[in-house]
Image (cartoon, rainbow, N blue to C red):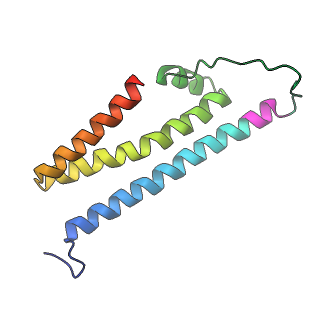
Amino acid sequence: MPLASGHSAADDRTEHVVGNLLRVGVLIAAAVALIGGVMYLLHAGSTQPDYRTFLGASSPLRSLAHIGRGVAAGEPEAIIQLGIVLLIATPIARVALTLVAFAKRKDRLYVAISAMVLALLAYGLLFS
Protein backbone atom coordinates (compact mmCIF):
# COMPACT_ATOMS: atom_id res chain seq x y z
CA MET A 1 0.00 0.00 0.00
CA PRO A 2 1.70 3.24 -1.12
CA LEU A 3 1.96 6.04 1.37
CA ALA A 4 1.43 9.72 0.60
CA SER A 5 5.10 10.05 -0.39
CA GLY A 6 4.74 7.34 -3.06
CA HIS A 7 6.72 4.81 -1.03
CA SER A 8 5.25 1.64 0.33
CA ALA A 9 5.57 0.68 3.98
CA ALA A 10 8.16 -1.93 2.93
CA ASP A 11 10.21 0.79 1.21
CA ASP A 12 10.13 2.95 4.32
CA ARG A 13 11.04 -0.01 6.52
CA THR A 14 13.98 -0.88 4.23
CA GLU A 15 15.20 2.74 4.25
CA HIS A 16 14.97 2.77 8.04
CA VAL A 17 16.95 -0.48 8.39
CA VAL A 18 19.59 0.66 5.88
CA GLY A 19 19.92 4.03 7.63
CA ASN A 20 20.38 2.32 10.97
CA LEU A 21 22.95 -0.05 9.47
CA LEU A 22 24.99 2.88 8.18
CA ARG A 23 24.78 4.78 11.47
CA VAL A 24 25.66 1.79 13.61
CA GLY A 25 28.44 0.69 11.25
CA VAL A 26 30.11 4.10 11.28
CA LEU A 27 29.76 4.42 15.06
CA ILE A 28 31.27 0.98 15.66
CA ALA A 29 34.11 1.67 13.23
CA ALA A 30 34.83 5.02 14.90
CA ALA A 31 34.73 3.48 18.37
CA VAL A 32 37.14 0.69 17.38
CA ALA A 33 39.55 3.15 15.74
CA LEU A 34 39.31 5.46 18.76
CA ILE A 35 40.09 2.61 21.15
CA GLY A 36 43.09 1.65 19.01
CA GLY A 37 44.19 5.29 18.85
CA VAL A 38 44.03 5.72 22.61
CA MET A 39 45.93 2.46 23.09
CA TYR A 40 48.55 3.63 20.59
CA LEU A 41 48.99 6.97 22.35
CA LEU A 42 49.29 5.25 25.72
CA HIS A 43 51.85 2.85 24.31
CA ALA A 44 53.92 5.08 22.01
CA GLY A 45 52.73 8.61 22.71
CA SER A 46 55.79 9.60 24.72
CA THR A 47 58.38 8.53 22.12
CA GLN A 48 60.30 11.32 20.43
CA PRO A 49 60.20 11.17 16.61
CA ASP A 50 63.39 11.73 14.63
CA TYR A 51 62.53 14.08 11.75
CA ARG A 52 66.10 14.33 10.39
CA THR A 53 65.83 11.15 8.34
CA PHE A 54 62.79 9.52 6.84
CA LEU A 55 62.51 5.80 7.43
CA GLY A 56 59.61 4.19 5.62
CA ALA A 57 58.04 1.36 7.52
CA SER A 58 56.34 -1.56 5.86
CA SER A 59 53.18 -2.69 7.53
CA PRO A 60 52.19 -6.33 7.96
CA LEU A 61 48.59 -5.16 8.37
CA ARG A 62 47.65 -5.47 4.71
CA SER A 63 45.49 -8.57 4.99
CA LEU A 64 42.52 -9.45 7.15
CA ALA A 65 44.42 -12.42 8.59
CA HIS A 66 47.27 -10.18 9.78
CA ILE A 67 44.81 -7.66 11.19
CA GLY A 68 42.94 -10.43 13.02
CA ARG A 69 46.14 -11.78 14.54
CA GLY A 70 47.19 -8.28 15.55
CA VAL A 71 43.83 -7.56 17.17
CA ALA A 72 43.97 -10.88 19.02
CA ALA A 73 47.43 -9.90 20.29
CA GLY A 74 46.13 -6.49 21.39
CA GLU A 75 48.28 -4.47 18.98
CA PRO A 76 47.03 -0.87 18.77
CA GLU A 77 47.92 -0.47 15.08
CA ALA A 78 45.89 -3.57 14.21
CA ILE A 79 42.90 -2.28 16.18
CA ILE A 80 43.05 1.05 14.31
CA GLN A 81 43.26 -0.86 11.03
CA LEU A 82 40.24 -2.96 12.07
CA GLY A 83 38.29 0.26 12.57
CA ILE A 84 39.19 1.31 9.03
CA VAL A 85 38.17 -2.09 7.65
CA LEU A 86 34.83 -1.82 9.45
CA LEU A 87 34.34 1.65 7.99
CA ILE A 88 34.99 0.28 4.49
CA ALA A 89 32.70 -2.71 5.13
CA THR A 90 29.74 -0.55 6.17
CA PRO A 91 28.66 0.63 2.68
CA ILE A 92 29.36 -2.85 1.31
CA ALA A 93 26.96 -4.27 3.90
CA ARG A 94 24.45 -1.63 2.79
CA VAL A 95 24.61 -2.85 -0.81
CA ALA A 96 24.24 -6.47 0.33
CA LEU A 97 21.26 -5.56 2.51
CA THR A 98 19.52 -3.69 -0.31
CA LEU A 99 20.17 -6.64 -2.62
CA VAL A 100 18.36 -8.90 -0.14
CA ALA A 101 15.51 -6.39 0.22
CA PHE A 102 15.06 -6.19 -3.56
CA ALA A 103 15.19 -10.00 -3.83
CA LYS A 104 12.43 -10.30 -1.21
CA ARG A 105 10.30 -7.92 -3.29
CA LYS A 106 11.18 -9.88 -6.44
CA ASP A 107 12.45 -6.72 -8.15
CA ARG A 108 14.76 -8.35 -10.68
CA LEU A 109 16.14 -5.15 -12.17
CA TYR A 110 17.35 -3.77 -8.85
CA VAL A 111 18.59 -7.19 -7.73
CA ALA A 112 20.73 -7.29 -10.89
CA ILE A 113 21.99 -3.73 -10.35
CA SER A 114 22.75 -4.37 -6.67
CA ALA A 115 24.52 -7.63 -7.52
CA MET A 116 26.62 -5.85 -10.13
CA VAL A 117 27.58 -3.10 -7.67
CA LEU A 118 28.41 -5.70 -5.02
CA ALA A 119 30.54 -7.65 -7.52
CA LEU A 120 32.40 -4.48 -8.52
CA LEU A 121 33.06 -3.60 -4.89
CA ALA A 122 34.33 -7.12 -4.19
CA TYR A 123 36.54 -7.01 -7.28
CA GLY A 124 37.95 -3.64 -6.27
CA LEU A 125 38.73 -4.85 -2.76
CA LEU A 126 40.21 -8.19 -3.74
CA PHE A 127 42.13 -7.37 -6.89
CA SER A 128 43.41 -3.80 -6.54
Q: Residue 25, position in %: x, y?
A: 46, 49
Instruction: Tell me: residue 6, above or below residue 107.
Output: below
Report the residue at 80% width, 20% height from top: 54
Q: Nearer the viewer, residue 52 or 94?
A: 52
Instruction: Tell me: residue 1, above or below residue 34.
Output: below
Instruction: Tell me: residue 112, above or below residue 82.
Output: below
- Number of numbered tags placed on the structure image: 0
Q: Residue 40, position in %: x, y?
A: 73, 33
Q: What segment is highlighted magenta in the picture? A: 40-45
Report the residue at 13% width, 50% height from top: 109
Q: Is residue 84 magenta?
A: no
Image quarter of the C terminus: top left
Q: Nearer the viewer, residue 112 or 20?
A: 112
Image quarter of the N terminus: bottom left
Q: Nearer the viewer, residue 120 or 60?
A: 120
Report the residue at 89% width, 22% height from top: 52
Instruction: Tell me: residue 13, above or below residue 78.
Output: below
Helix, strand or loop: magenta stretch: helix
Q: Residue 26, position in %: x, y?
A: 51, 50
82 left or right, relative to 57: left
108 left or right, relative to 73: left
Report the residue at 38% width, 23% height from top: 127
Q: Residue 64, position in %: x, y?
A: 48, 24
